[in-house]
Image (tube, rainbow, N blue to C red):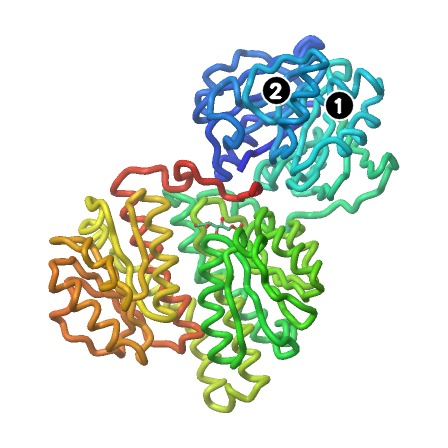
Amino acid sequence: MCGIIGYNGKDNAIPIVINGLKSLEYRGYDSSGIAYFLNDKIKIIKEEGRIKKLEESLTNDTSNLAIGHTRWATHGKPSKINSHPHRVGNVTIVHNGIIENYATLKEKLEKDGYVFKSETDTEVACALIDNLYKKTKDKLKTLNKLQEYLKGSYALLILFEDSRDTIYAIRVGSPLIVAKGSNGNFVASDIPAILEYTNKYYLLLEGEIAVIKRDSIVFYQDSKEIKKELLTFEHDISSAKKEGYSHFMLKEIHEQPTVIKNFLEYYLNNLELIPDLSKYKKIHIVACGSAYHAGLIASYLISKYGDMEVSTYVASEYRYKKNFIDNKTLVILISQSGETADTIASLRLAKEYKATTIGIVNVVGSTISREADEVIYINAGCEIAVATTKAYTLQVLALSLFAFKLGIKKGIIKGIEKEAIIKDYLKLPKEIEKILKVDYKEYAKKIYKHKSVFFIGRLIDYCICEEGSLKLKEISYIHSETYPAGELKHGTISLIEENTPVIAVVTDKNIADKTVSNIKEVKARGAYTLVLKNKSLQLDKGIYDDVIEITNLNDLALAILAIIPLQMIAFEVANMLGYDIDKPRNLAKSVTVE
Ligand code: F6R
């Protein structure tokens, strides 16, 4: 969602901030803007659309202090007037998050004489800061008071026109980092924005305020100055660059053999670091989007190998329903960003009911990683493409190891079976490399012109289909749906016409015959059928138009291998259609609002 960057230093801040905004593009946005000091006055330039448009509106100005923003519309449509920075009186701000009580605040501020130009909650927050500052005449007091008034989540960068040398930053609910460079200091919503200049950063925590000057950074919590640890971002900068690939998504798909190999080498040698699930009575897995699909796969694997009750929930539902959580429940939260608003809310709810919580997270230091009782980092490195690939497969792998360890503990997996499973895990990197050599354009050609695509599968294959279908629709904008294969004839089969693409996943040999019958049903009605199956399954050639075969592995590993062709098909289809694959329309990488 919205991206924020600020720079205060010796160099020209304008290109640095524009550069930073470009590195944050992956978060998703519809407009952008910049504010900088010019001759002791703040100048604002903003535009609807891509950052390129903002660049075209820039003049030759130079400045040593600037803040910038990419907006993902929540309150008010994407437009120049609604985009950030917003200015009211002495105050100029950029904001990520949602001010939930903005309507009430707006009414009060209007009574005090404030007139609003935009439809945004941000302009209201800006007016409130101006109003409080007029009363307190003290910037820190103003920002402390602000927290009493604002409800919701906000990461704010604030410039006061009478304070030419300072950026103020405050974080409640939405992430912010403050970074220390050799020629100046930075503040940003995510690390890629500053990586070109420095890898030394502080993590701003809930309610903290940073006062950022050219050569100093001071932090405050509850009006008191605090000391914070300077952290180092360990991944190298190449993880935020395309490195010769046409798209981040393609690069991230191809990184999977390496990140999976690293993860396996570490955890298979240190299985004691994988949580012991046998202590709990029941397990809830909670997540959104692709992370939810990883959770669906996990519920099959953990119940099969661990003989345990596991349910997977969409976080935006879980946080509002009755869940029967108690102190014997384990709640696993899966989130690449660790900042997804609904997943965070579910984590806090689980903690209220005294459940144990484990986060499976990529972004180090993110809210979920800090608030969960235990955290397993998937170590995928930066994932820039909005559509997740490598983080998703690592989430599945982490949970697969949970199931594996539980199976061993309960004596369900033992002896040669255990050794065979380890061998299969270790085959994954090479098998993925092999399957990435297939030319997926051949299949994409048969799909990209269609309006609708259907994915079918049963049990774990159904869960794999859910992720394959999401990948396809989010980047190609083709309507795509997944059905448990047996459900099709309860209504949906009426949509199958001559050449409608149906992608069937058949990796589970125990249920293969049933899925095959369903493939025959759609084939008989004219569908183009593409079957993704494991090599050892013998299928009658007449049932499919095309087939992709993957090596037969134990399902603890196979679930990871099977998604790779579907990621590639989605990529090739979107590429043929010429879409902006890394930044699909309307989507944001990190969904920090409800
Ligand atoms: C889809 C995708 C999203 C995310 C979802 C959760 O490709 O990336 O569906 O999986 O928004 O995000 P995290 O994992 O950051 O909580």
Looking at numbered disc 2 in the image, what kind of residue is underneath it?
His
The nearer-to-camera label among 2 and 1 is 2
- Residue with the mark numbered 1: 166
Question: Looking at the picture, how far across and down is residue 171, in whole percent?
Answer: 70, 37
Q: Residue at x 55, y 16 (%)?
A: 45
Question: Looking at the picture, how far across and down is residue 232, in whole percent?
Answer: 69, 48
**Kind of element beneath mark 1:** loop
Labels 2 and 1: the sequence-earlier one: 2
Pointer 2 residue Cβ closer than 8 Å to ligand 1: no
Q: Residue furthest bottom?
A: 415
**Kind of element beneath mark 2:** strand
Residue 417: assigned label: none
Q: Residue at x 32, y 38 (%)?
A: 579
Q: Residue at x 49, y 76 (%)?
A: 303
**Does any portion of residue 65 appear in the rendered image?**
no
Nearest the eye: 431 or 123: 123
Q: Quadrant of residue 326?
A: bottom right
- Residue with the mark numbered 2: 86
Image position of 416 (left or right of 194): left
Alpha-carbon neighbours of circle 2 within 10 Å: few (<14), some, or many (≥20)? many
Q: Quadrant of residue 9?
A: top right
Nearest the eye: 157 or 235: 157
Q: Residue at x 82, y 27 (%)?
A: 140
Q: Looking at the image, is 566 positioned above or below residue 540?
A: above
Question: Looking at the picture, how far across and down is residue 352, in whole percent?
Answer: 71, 58
Locate the C terminus and report the quarter of the image it occupies.
top right
